[in-house]
Image (cartoon, rainbow, N blue to C red):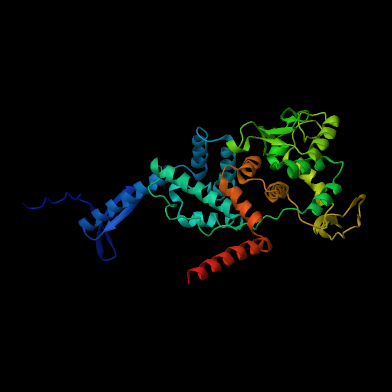
């Protein structure tokens, strides 16, 4: 059977120079009529079909939502089945690392290169942050592909492997450093914050969300219950009753030194919060930084500030000397010659539990670790990274092994 020939329109012709061309006009994606030319009717017909396909594709791309619009919609969809704390984390990362660099682009226009460029600043952050941002990109664009918002998923070959800055091992404070730190901030609200980190192992958000109704000082065995978490949105404090994980909800026994500290602090407190601002409410992020600043101002860590002189912004460097008084505040003495962070207080608590031979399961519970892997990683580094203690054990093992081998001979 002979193949049926396609019907080709009878296009008009136009002479350009000494050559005659077939010509027709079509509307592009913007509604503008454009001319298309061909030497033959068949050539013009093929060019018209190709142009229409491209126009349809351009029209589709322009109708797709922007990355900002779709990412916000995706976050809203997630809110139905994830924890509030997880949603807060997702929202923060999506706004900073997805919407900020690519929010203005159409979903269908985003390429793998666009995403990799957006990830360059993220690669300067920790490995865990980099990995979570990559996962968010993959989830958002996969959802868009599954919902037929886009035809191609630019994150298919995207990987988090090798990205981000590996975290260095956390170093706990020594007993001497603990005493120096506590002595430096004694009498301040910062002292109570530090005590809760060192002697209860609370995370920063757990300390700042702690209320007196969760602290049981008059029990035969005093303890506190972790059931709230602090968070800020636009520098405003938000106290969450839903914790990040089930494991975070725990009862923590209080050692005598912490009981004494909290009893003294409660006697003068006029707030329902253990750590509060002057109005009795929870701290804002700025207020927390001010609370921690009491430690920084007493440290020998080099720092700088800017001051306007003769209309110019001049940088001044402060190089504190251990034991000296601060130039602008005679009550402040530089006594802290080591680095310390809020999380380091908690790490010191966990390390001390392990050093005291507390079993891993109990350490996991008191630390509020959801995964035993987190606990065991710390446990292994603290318990077994001591060659001087392991050497005699291994010597005994291999001596017995050698003797067994000789007996067989």
Quadrant of the image occupied by residue 264: top right
In the image, taking residue 180 as reference, residue 155 lies left or right, namely left
- Decide which of 392, 279 is in the foreground and name it: 392
Horizontal and vertical percent for residue 221? Answer: 74, 32
Where is residue 360? Give x, y as percent.
Answer: 61, 46
- Which of the 4 image quarters holds residue 246? top right
The image shows residue 52 at horizontal and vertical percentages of 31, 49
Left or right: residue 16 compared with residue 123: left
Q: Residue at x 50, y 34 (%)?
A: 81
Q: Residue at x 77, y 30 (%)?
A: 217
Residue depicted at x 77% and y 39%: 255
From what the image shows, is residue 42 above or below residue 141? Answer: below
Residue 229 lies left or right of residue 287; in this view the side is left
Q: Nearer the viewer, residue 308 or 240?
A: 240
**In this rendering, would 153 be left or right of 355?**
left
**Which residue is painted at 46% across and 51% down in the image?**
110
**Where's residue 193, x and y in %?**
77, 41
Q: Is residue 218 above or below residue 300?
A: above
- Residue in front for this viewpoint, 115 or 365: 365
**132 or 70: nearer the eye?**
132
Determine if residue 87 is in view: yes
């Amino acid at each position: 059977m002979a193949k049926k020939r396609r019907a080709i329109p009878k296009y008009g012709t136009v002479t350009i120079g000494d050559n005659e061309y077939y010509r027709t006009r079509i509307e592009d994606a913007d509604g503008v009529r454009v001319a298309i030319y061909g030497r033959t009717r068949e050539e013009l017909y093929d060019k018209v079909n190709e142009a229409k396909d491209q126009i349809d594709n351009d029209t589709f791309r322009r109708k797709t939502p922007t990355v900002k619009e779709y990412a916000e919609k995706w976050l809203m969809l997630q809110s139905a089945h994830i924890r509030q704390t997880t949603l807060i984390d997702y929202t923060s990362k999506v706004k900073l690392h997805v919407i900020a660099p690519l929010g203005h682009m159409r979903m269908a226009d985003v390429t793998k290169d666009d995403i990799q460029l957006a990830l360059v600043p993220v690669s300067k952050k920790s490995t865990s942050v980099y990995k979570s941002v990559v996962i968010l990109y993959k989830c958002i664009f996969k959802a868009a592909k599954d919902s037929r918002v886009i035809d191609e998923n630019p994150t298919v070959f995207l990987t988090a492997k090798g990205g981000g800055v590996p975290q260095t091992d956390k170093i706990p404070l020594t007993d001497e450093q603990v005493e120096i730190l506590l002595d430096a901030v004694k009498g301040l609200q910062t002292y109570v914050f530090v005590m809760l980190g060192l002697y209860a192992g609370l995370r920063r958000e757990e300390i700042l969300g702690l209320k007196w109704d969760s602290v049981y000082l008059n029990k035969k065995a005093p303890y506190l219950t972790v059931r709230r978490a602090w968070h800020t949105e636009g520098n405003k404090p938000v106290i969450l009753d839903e914790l990040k994980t089930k494991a975070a909800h725990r009862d923590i026994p209080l050692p005598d030194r912490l009981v004494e500290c909290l009893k003294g602090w409660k006697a003068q407190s006029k707030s329902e919060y253990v750590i509060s601002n002057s109005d009795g409410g929870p701290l804002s992020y700025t207020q927390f930084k001010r609370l921690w600043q009491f430690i920084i101002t007493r440290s020998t860590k080099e720092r700088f500030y800017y001051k306007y002189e003769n209309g110019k912004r001049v940088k001044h460097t402060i190089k504190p000397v251990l034991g000296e008084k601060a130039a602008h505040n005679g009550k402040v003495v530089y006594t802290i010659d080591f680095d310390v962070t809020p999380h380091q207080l908690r790490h010191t608590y966990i390390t001390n539990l392990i050093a005291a031979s507390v079993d891993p399961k109990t350490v996991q519970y008191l630390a509020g670790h959801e995964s035993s892997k987190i606990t065991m990683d710390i446990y292994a580094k603290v318990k077994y990274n001591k060659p001087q203690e392991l050497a005699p054990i291994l010597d005994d093992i291999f001596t017995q092994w050698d003797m067994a081998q000789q007996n067989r001979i």
